[in-house]
Amino acid sequence: MRPTYTTNGAVMPCVFMPYAPANVNKVFAAGGTLEDIWKEPFFAGVRSWQKNYGFHEPERMANGNLLMACPVRDHHKELRRIVLEHEPDPVDENARQALLDPEYAQGLFAYDEALEGLTRPIWEQQYLGHGGN
C-alpha cells in the first residue's frame, strides 16, 4: 500500500481505491502526523488483507494468487467488506456511487470469479510449481 493524496488533502491507500479515512490538512492542523494517518483503521484493514493474502511470502501462499493482486479489481467483495467496516469517505461522487450500485458490485464479483478460474491454474503450475510441467 502506497498512500495517495488528493489535491484537497484526502489520503487514500492508492489512486485506484478512492476512499479516504483521513485528510492530511486536517490531521496536520490538529497537530497530528503522518503516523496518525498510517494508524487509521481503514489503512490497517487494507494492510491486514494484504498480509493475509500472502504479499509478504508469495512462495508460501496457500490461498493467494499474485496474478490477482488488486483488492479493488480482483477481490471486490473484500474491498467492500473493508470499506463498509471502516467507513472511509469516498473521494468523489463516482466512488460513492460505486458503493451504492448493486449492478456494479455484481459485475465485479462475477469478474473476480471468472479471473480466479482463469488464473488459478497458471499461478499454481507456473509460479508455485504444483503439478504440470
Image: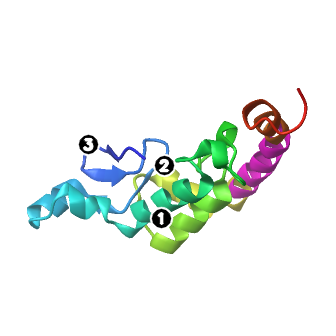
Disc 3 marks which amino acid? Thr
Name the residue that disc number 1 marks.
Answer: 45
Region of the chain picked out in magenta, as a range: 105-118
User: Can residue 97 be seen in the rendering of this structure?
Assistant: no
Q: Which quadrant holds residue 38?
A: bottom left
Regarding mark 2 in the picture, which secondary structure is present there? loop
In the rendered image, which quarter contains the C terminus? top right
Residue displayed at 59% across by 51% down: 54
Location of residue 86 in the rendering, given as x and y in whole percent from the top left corner? 46, 71
Regarding mark 1 in the picture, which secondary structure is present there? helix
Residue at far bottom of view:
85
- In the image, is 70 to the left or to the right of 103? left
CB within 8 Å, label 3 to label 2: no
| First reached walking from the N terminus: tag 3 or tag 2 | 3
Mark 1 or 2, which is nearer the eye? Answer: 1
* Measured Cα–Cα span from mark 1 to mark 2: 13 Å
Disc 1 marks which amino acid? Gly
Residue displayed at 67% across by 60% down: 77
Query: Observer-nearest residue: 117 or 96?
Result: 117
Mark 3 or 1, which is nearer the eye? Answer: 1
Q: How is the image coloured?
A: rainbow
| First reached walking from the N terminus: tag 1 or tag 2 | 2
Regarding mark 3 in the picture, which secondary structure is present there? loop
Name the residue that disc number 2 marks.
Answer: 17
* Measured Cα–Cα span from mark 3 to mark 1: 24 Å
Location of residue 113 in the rendering, given as x and y in whole percent from the top left corner? 80, 50
* Measured Cα–Cα span from mark 3 to mark 2: 16 Å
Mark 3 or 2, which is nearer the eye? Answer: 2
Name the residue that disc number 3 marks.
Answer: 7
Q: Which quadrant holds residue 35?
A: bottom left
